[in-house]
Amino acid sequence: MALEKSDVEKIAHLARLHIDATEAQEVTNRISSILNMIDQMQSVETHNVAPLAHPFDAVQRLRPDVVTETNQREYLQKIAPATQDGLYLVPKVIE
Amino acid sequence: MSRRTVAALSRSLAQGEFSSTELTRDYLDRIKKFNGVFNAYITVTEELALAQAAAADQRRARGEHGPLTGIPLAHKDIFCMRDVLTTCGSKMLANFISPYDATVVERFNAAGTVTLGKTNMDEFAMGSSNETSFFGAVRNPWDTERVPGGSSGGSAAAVAADLCAMATGTDTGGSIRQPAAFCGITGFKPSYGRISRWGMIAFASSLDQAGPICKSAEDAALMMNVMAGPDIKDSTCVDMAAPDYMATLNDSLKGLRIGVPRQHLAKGLGAEVESALQEALKLYESLGATVHEVDLPNSHLSVSAYYVIAPAEASANLSRFDGVRYGYRCENPVNLEDMYKRTRSEGFGSEVKRRIMVGTYALSAGFYDAYYLKAQQIRRLIKNDFDNAFKDVDVIIGPTTPHTAFKIGEKNDDPVTMYLEDIYTIAVNLAGLPGMSIPAGMHNGLPIGIQLVGKDFDEARLLNIAHQYQQNTDWHLQRPEV
């Protein structure tokens, strides 16, 4: 299926990506080509086929609800772009 | 010292022929000399390697060693290693010093292996040529004009050029097996859930699996004995003790029923690969196996279904890279949305962005049934095909790749051309089965690989079948001139 440039802009926004105007057409063409290949799936009738989400039918294992890890906030925040008082800093969200 | 299998190195270390420190220095020297040519490593951990080698020598002196104690290895740069740069081949993580170890890394450390460094890879494991790496393409040790395959291209090139004794890899659609085939080495993808994915940066969580990249099936068995088994930190890692993979390597193949997929011998398969495959089947017959044709009627749909499922899962997994907690953040964002968008657009390469967008589209409102649900239904059909085939045979053998390694830049014009490179390997991931590639011939100076696919969790049998082949041939011992 062929996409329009506007479709790609919408998808990019959903994925929080920015597409430059200069590359929009090429990105659109390449994604359309991938979708064309994917559309081969539509040639097969799968009406009564149960979807397979995972290689084996397993149920989520549970463990006792007890603390097993110690707090490592300072250590883990050492690699953050910006922190203050134990919090992650981002650009101002509320004016 | 180098240029031997892990099993041989382990015997030499045990006999005191040389120490792990001497062996490690030898490998570090080779890396210094040749990494500039192949670009197999992103990071070399020389100091750590020498410290681990010294510790391994002491362990051996105390008699507290295992077979892999003191053996130098490399980890694909997708495995988190505490206090070591872990990039996943991306600008997004080009500054990421991991605060913890992946379970795979932890287990090798506990076994006393020596970590030489982190190997190059396609960005976020998305690629079949290692050309999408932010750190540059890896070159095939058999011909530096050619790709080593991908995404575990750095690990495969490092093993083939003997810049490490063994390496770890990951395989989502063929990323261990295809580079192993292109580089003339042994690559093993266990069943989904056999090895913990904890600390292995996620691409497509229902497909990703770690495995050994090495010089022989015996080496793969030695590595599997360290890597496999349950892990409390990964609930998709099956709660089933792993067997001793060395114990059954020498089992007889008498009565083994081999299935060859009719669909894999069809149009698209290179004549040189087909003839190597036929030679291998003849050898198996001489070892007491019988060869049967099997049907995988939906195998032609595997690439289509995969390129919905893998990008869909990737689009969710890669949403965590937002510039907030770690990794790259763009300069001077004007607001939060600008920060997200520019961080992700500047931090991800074009192939990764393409796959995120395909996945986002497939999961978006109104398209879910036509794409994601449909792909999961096809995935069921593909798994059913294998289940049916395995009613009559014990193992499926076919080509790993349609042809030998292609040239750098040859398949970059259209992403779909590159995707079709994984036509024989992808179905195995969709079905969650164990698969491996072993060298089975040469053509114009380039290695040819064949693929062995086993039943669920039947890794021991697969390693046994590959080992018996390698006991009777020497393709796995061929090395490029490095």
Image: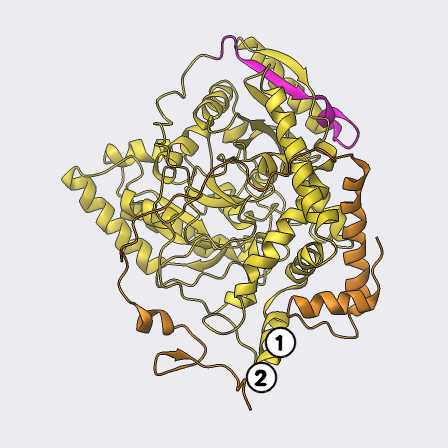
Chain colours: A orange, B yellow
Kindly identify which residue carries mark 2.
B333
Badge 1 element = helix
Q: Is residue B213 located in the magenta-colored stretch of the structure? A: no
B342 relative to B434, above or below: below
Residue B298, position in %: x, y?
A: 72, 30
Q: Are circles 2 and 1 on residues that touch, CB within 8 Å?
A: yes
At mark 2, the secondary structure is loop
**Side of A52 where A4 appears, left or right:** right
Residue tagged 1: B342
Q: Residue A90, relative to residue B173: is it above or below?
A: below
Q: Which mark is residue B273?
A: none
User: Which residue ends up furthest to the bottom in the rendered image?
Assistant: A95
Quarter of image, res B436: top right
Where is residue B407? Give x, y as percent: 70, 48
Residue B410 seen in this snapshot: no
| Percent coordinates x, y for residue B451 in the rendering | 59, 29
Residue at 42 percent of width and 49 percent of height? B74
Subunit bearing disc 1: B
Q: Earlier in the sequence, mark 2 or mark 1?
A: 2
Query: Which residue corresponds to the image point at 28% horizontal and 59% vertical from the top-left?
Result: A69
Q: For the residue marked with disc 1, what is the amino acid?
A: Arg
Q: CA distance from mark 2 to mark 1?
A: 8 Å
Parent chain of label 2: B
Residue type, label 2: Pro
Counting other residues with Cα less than 10 Å from the Cα at mark 2, is it few (<14), some (14-19), or many (20 or more)?
some
Residue at 57% across, 38% down: B177
The front one of B431 and B256 is: B431
Q: Is residue B380 left or right of residue A24?
A: left
Q: Position of residue B399 (x, y in %)?
A: 65, 29
Q: Are marks 2 and 1 on the same chain?
A: yes
Which segment is the magenta one? Answer: B253-271
